[in-house]
Image (spheres, helix red, strand yellow):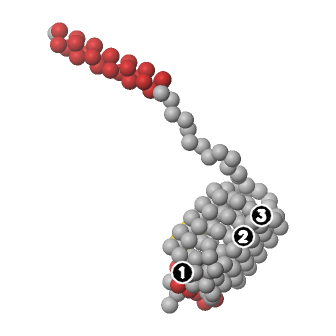
Amino acid sequence: MKKILLRLFTLILILILAFIWVMLNPQPAFAQINTINYNNASLENRDFSHTDLVGVTFVAAEMRGTNFQGANLTNAILTKGVLLKANLEGANLAGALVDRVTLDGANLKNAIFTEATLTRSRFFDADVTGADFTDALIDRYQVALLCKRADGVNPVTGISTRESLGCR
């Protein structure tokens, strides 16, 4: 009986000490500081050229004719967006999530899409001259369409558009 009481007392003591340690040793939450959120925003014809937009979210944003020329959109989130005739010339979208985005008629010259996720997005009549899609995840149908007009070499990465898309 003494052994059982001693074990029970030891267990309770360990639980109390663990509780006190957890309460006295709080860890800060790792939230992104200064995160900009353009979700559901109307950004038609806005000028974001040469802007640092690393990690910024543009979920369901209306961005027709928006200028992102030379912008840094590394790891940005652009989902369910409309970028009809937008200018992304020379923009860096490395690691970006570009899911269900309409990029019809967009200027993607020399844009960098390395390791980006471009699923269920459309690129009809988009200019992809010099764009780098190395290790990007793109729907096969869109790759086939992009390969029909893929041309040029990205001036920053030195990779040809056709090579980055895996065109035959």
Q: Position of residue 93 (x, y in %)?
A: 63, 67
Up/down of 97 relative to 161, above or below:
above
Q: Which residue is mark 2?
A: 70
Q: Which residue is mark 3?
A: 48
Is 80 or 110 nearer to us in this picture? 110
Q: Which mark is residue 54?
A: none
Secondary structure under tag 1 reads helix
- Dot 2 alpha-carbon crowd within 10 angstroms: few under 14, some 14 to 19, many 20 or more: some
Q: Quadrant of the N terminus?
A: top left
- Dot 1 alpha-carbon crowd within 10 angstroms: few under 14, some 14 to 19, many 20 or more: many
Amino acid under disc 1: Ser
Mark 1 vs mark 2: which is more N-terminal? Answer: 2
Q: Position of residue 125 (x, y in %)?
A: 70, 83
The CA distance from mark 3 to mark 1 is 26 Å
Q: Which residue is mark 1?
A: 164
Amino acid under disc 3: Phe
